[in-house]
Amino acid sequence: MNLGFHYHVPAINKNGKIFMPGYLGFFIDSLSPYFTNIYCFLHTPLENEKKEMDYQIKSKNLILVNYGVHSSIPKRLFWNFFNSNSILKKYEKNIDIFLVRASTPSLYFFERIFKSKIALLLVSDAVEGLDNLNQNKIRLLLIKIWANFYQKYEHKLVSKRKTIVNSDLLFNRLKAINKDIKLIRTTTLRDTDFHFREDTCKNNKIIFFYAGRVTKIKGLLDIIHALNIVFKNSSRDFVFNIAGMVNDGDNIPKKY
């Protein structure tokens, strides 16, 4: 069985080897044993994104299809309008099921070609967190209009397509639309990634670590607020380390 896959994340082919961000590459590699081939329709990275292509795909059955430049959403939609039909039709007969990781602005164009072959993996809410974007009022208004329009279309597909979600929040919101919706956990962690120490939290200094996208919608300010409460009620020292990608559009306070 051949799988098609799309998410609005870039990837690049370097000397016959495929690279993409680690969180997506690990996910793709974990799928590869279950399919004959995986056709990944991913964008070409912008120059400043090439440094994020830090994971080399290990699977030999992945076929990378260039799905245009990872430009702004309006430019991608314009590109889709003129190019997606001819590109997708080349692979229509090769693909048995097409998994779209969403939310993603190109969803309509994939559904138009693959129709009942489409399966959705929802990992985010299209409208939640928009107020955290660092945009001027007019641009933010246009983004909200687009996001609400997109979400209505996405929910329409959820009602009639195989749908998987990776959070309890999305599951509880969408189970009324699709009673057969499935809840799974997506992670880039393996059992071997966990290291257990006998002296954890026994020293005077306790070190906390966050790894993930650096944005308010991931709950970072909630963590900082919680640590502040703990710090005020404890004699121990605390260190909070943050490692992750910062998006230019996220409205992140410089100080807290």
Image (spheres, rainbow, N blue to C red):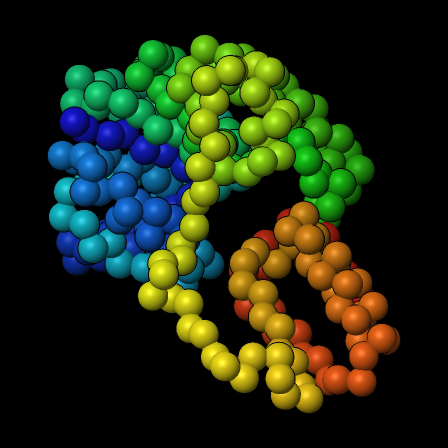
Specify the farthest residue to the right: 232
Determine the residue positioned at 77% across, 34% down. Answer: 138
- Foreground of the two, 225 or 10: 225
* Residue 152 drawn at (x, y percent): 61, 17
Picture residue at 69% right of the left edge, 53% below the top: 219
Q: In the image, is 142 to the left or to the right of 86?
A: right
> 192 or 15, which is in the foreground?
192
Asked if 154 appears above or below 21 in the picture, the reply is: above
Residue 50 appearing in the image: no
Q: Residue at x 83, y 68 (%)?
A: 229
Judge from the rendering whether residue 75 lies leftward or rightward of residue 84; answer left or right. Answer: right
Q: Quadrant of residue 211?
A: bottom right
Locate residue 140: give its quadrant: top right
Classify the position of the N terminus by image quarter: top left
Residue 96 is at least partly visible in this image: yes
Give the quadrant of residue 119. Answer: top left
